Image (cartoon, grey):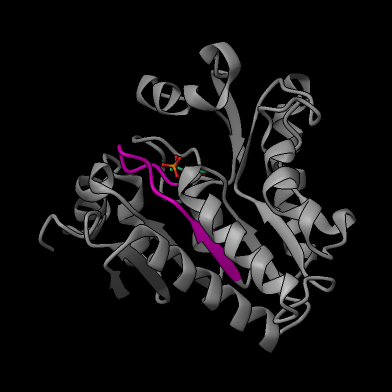
Amino acid sequence: SQRHIFPTSDAAAQAVAAHIINTVKAKPDAVLGLATGATMEPVYAHLIAAYQRGDVRFSGVTTFNLDEYAGLSPSDPGSYRSTMDRLFFDHVDIDKNRTFLPEASLDASAAAGNDYEAMIVKAGGIDLQLLGIGRNGHIGFNEPGSAIDSRTRLVELHEETLAANAKFFDGGKVPGSAITMGIGTILSAREIVVLATGAAKADAVRDAHCGTFSEDCPASALQTHNRVLWFLDSAAADARF
Ligand code: F6R
């Protein structure tokens, strides 16, 4: 893997945005795997700014988000569909019919995972998967204990993840389950771009680089992929590799 370390979180986010822009310029019909979370907000802001400057167009791309909360309607302001519309899709020339998130109504769960996998395959597979990392090393919503070959499925979220994400919900009530791409799904992407910023991520970033795959740190599975680019600020990189 390659590691790029920046003095500030915004510089790291800007570098990730620049990498995505280069990918889309080289392949206007690229398939992008997208992520939500606070870490990604400045990335989308930089992508929108680049679009407004005329530096990039998104009209040909297809996107698949990593995950979606279960049991929320897409129009719920807390859903990742609403979040992606608000933070990115509504502000660029992307064709919303080619922006996908797992279908996460509570009764659709089992088949929904297989459908999502099939849609990714039909689109030609993911060229670039954007990834954040949880404090406990989760990627997507693959919490510790997830199998390295897991695929898109319904999962229960850990207490720590619920607490970290409460800030995105009025009154703090986060859905307890989600549909997420599996670790195996993520590893099927041709390139993986991880952005981690802030001291709270330093331990998870370190564990992701230590030894071999351990179910205790889902991000450690990234060591088995041949093209992973880590973009870190100095605080997240601060735990000595
Ligand atoms: C979001 C996702 C999660 C986040 C992770 C970090 O789609 O899959 O794995 O990337 O929870 O979240 P933030 O950036 O809020 O610290």
Question: Relative to 16, is 107 above or below?
Answer: above
Residue located 60% across and 83% down the image: 22
Residue located 70% across and 52% down the image: 117
Kindly give the residue lying farthest to the left in the view shown: 240
Residue interval drawn in magenta: 128-139
Q: Quadrant of the C terminus?
A: bottom left
Kindly give the residue lying farthest to the front in the view shown: 53
Given residues 181 and 100, the one toward you in this image is 100
Given residues 43 and 130, the one toward you in this image is 43
Q: Position of residue 102 (x, y in %)?
A: 71, 41
Q: Is residue 12 magenta?
A: no
Kindly give the residue lying farthest to the bottom in the view shown: 26
Q: Position of residue 160 (x, y in %)?
A: 35, 24
Q: Is residue 110 left or right of residue 170?
A: right
Q: Is residue 130 magenta?
A: yes
Q: Is residue 236 left or right of residue 156?
A: left
| Observer able to see residue 76 | yes
Q: Position of residue 36 (x, y in %)?
A: 57, 45
Question: Relative to 206, is 68 above or below?
Answer: above
Residue located 66% across and 73% down the image: 50
**Number of labelled discs?**
0
Given residues 164 and 113, the one toward you in this image is 164
Q: Quadrant of the N terminus?
A: bottom left
- Look at the magenta stretch and give its main secondary structure: loop
